[in-house]
Image (cartoon, helix red, strand yellow):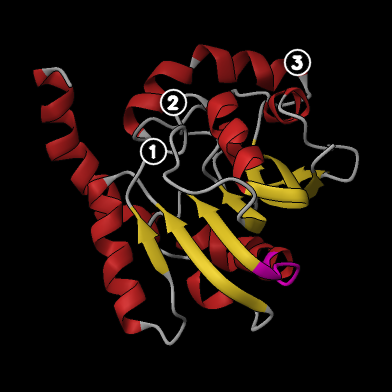
């Protein structure tokens, strides 16, 4: 890590984690929270969540799950995640590791969860390859993600403003074609639903969500 990156992480990265839940409050109350609840109702068995962040999803998981592993590489987010897990009745194991290198065995989970995280992982293709590795045959990915706009005009603005958005968004890319990345990684995309992230800035309003099975 360069000195500049270390300084950025120590200042803005820490502040971003501290503000994250408050920053999403209007979006969560405007409909994202209900989307999470509907999505996670489909989780069963052994579950791994990629980029668990501050643990927003933790108490939304149904009783049908038998194991929950929360992966979070960012130390500032992981600190808040540990506090949330300690205060929750939901048992969970926290793994502080990058999504591209999961220290988890092959074929060990029935369901993977990724909500607003594939926009931020440095290499989403590698992270999806890791999820494919740790999922059992026939496993599923439950997804909510803001994505590249289908409308050409908005997509151009996403491209123009991607760098400043990424800087202030702690690495979040506003213009990733996540549907194409999922398909290339061997996940079904036909059942995923496009929509709008409620009460979100226009650059990150285009949404992809649903359950994606392995080919």
Q: Nearer the viewer, residue 114 or 167?
A: 114
Q: How many marks?
A: 3
First in residue order: circle 3 vs circle 2 = 2
Which residue is identified by label 1? 98
Which quarter of the figure has residue 170? top left
Q: Residues within 10 Å of mark 2 (few under 14, many from 20)?
A: some
Does the rendering let one see residue 205?
no
Q: Which residues are magenta?
A: 40-45
First in residue order: circle 2 vs circle 1 = 1
Indicate which disc residue 139 carries. none
Q: Residues within 10 Å of mark 3 (few under 14, many from 20)?
A: few
Image point (55%, 57%), residue name? 48
Residue 195 placed where, x, y %? 78, 45
Image point (39%, 83%), residue name? 88
Q: Nearer the viewer, residue 120 or 27?
A: 120
Left or right: 194 in relation to 40: right
Which secondary structure lies at badge 3? helix
Give the spatial CA distance, label 3 vs label 1. 33 Å
In this view, the residue farthest toward the right is: 190
Image point (48%, 62%), residue name? 69
Indicate which disc residue 122 carries. 2
Is 32 drawn above or below residue 115 in the view shown? below
Which residue is identified by label 3? 152
Left or right: 165 in relation to 132: left
Give the spatial CA distance, label 3 vs label 2. 25 Å
Residues at marks 2 and 1 touching, judged by CB atoms closer than 8 Å: yes
Which secondary structure lies at badge 1? loop
| Quadrant including the C terminus | top right
Residue 179 placed where, x, y %? 75, 30
């Amino acid at each position: 890590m360069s000195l500049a990156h270390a300084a950025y992480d120590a200042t803005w990265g820490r502040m971003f984690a501290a503000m994250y839940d408050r920053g999403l409050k209007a979006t969560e109350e405007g409909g994202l929270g209900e989307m999470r609840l509907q999505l996670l109702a489909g989780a069963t068995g052994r579950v791994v969540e990629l980029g668990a962040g501050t643990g927003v999803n933790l108490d939304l998981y149904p009783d049908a799950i038998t194991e929950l592993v929360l992966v979070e590489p960012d130390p500032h987010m992981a600190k808040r995640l540990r506090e949330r897990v300690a205060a929750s009745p939901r048992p969970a194991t926290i793994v502080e590791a990058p999504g591209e290198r999961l220290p988890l065995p092959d074929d060990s989970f029935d369901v993977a969860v990724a909500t607003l995280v594939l926009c931020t992982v440095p290499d989403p293709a590698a992270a999806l390859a890791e999820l494919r590795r740790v999922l059992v045959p026939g496993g599923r990915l439950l997804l909510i993600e803001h994505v590249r706009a289908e409308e050409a005009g908005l997509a151009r603005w996403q491209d123009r403003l991607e760098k400043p958005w990424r800087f202030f968004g702690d690495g979040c890319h506003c213009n990733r074609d996540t549907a194409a990345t999922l398909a290339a990684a061997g996940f079904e995309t036909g059942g995923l639903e496009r929509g709008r992230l409620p009460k979100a800035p226009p650059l990150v309003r285009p949404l992809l969500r649903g359950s994606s099975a392995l080919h």
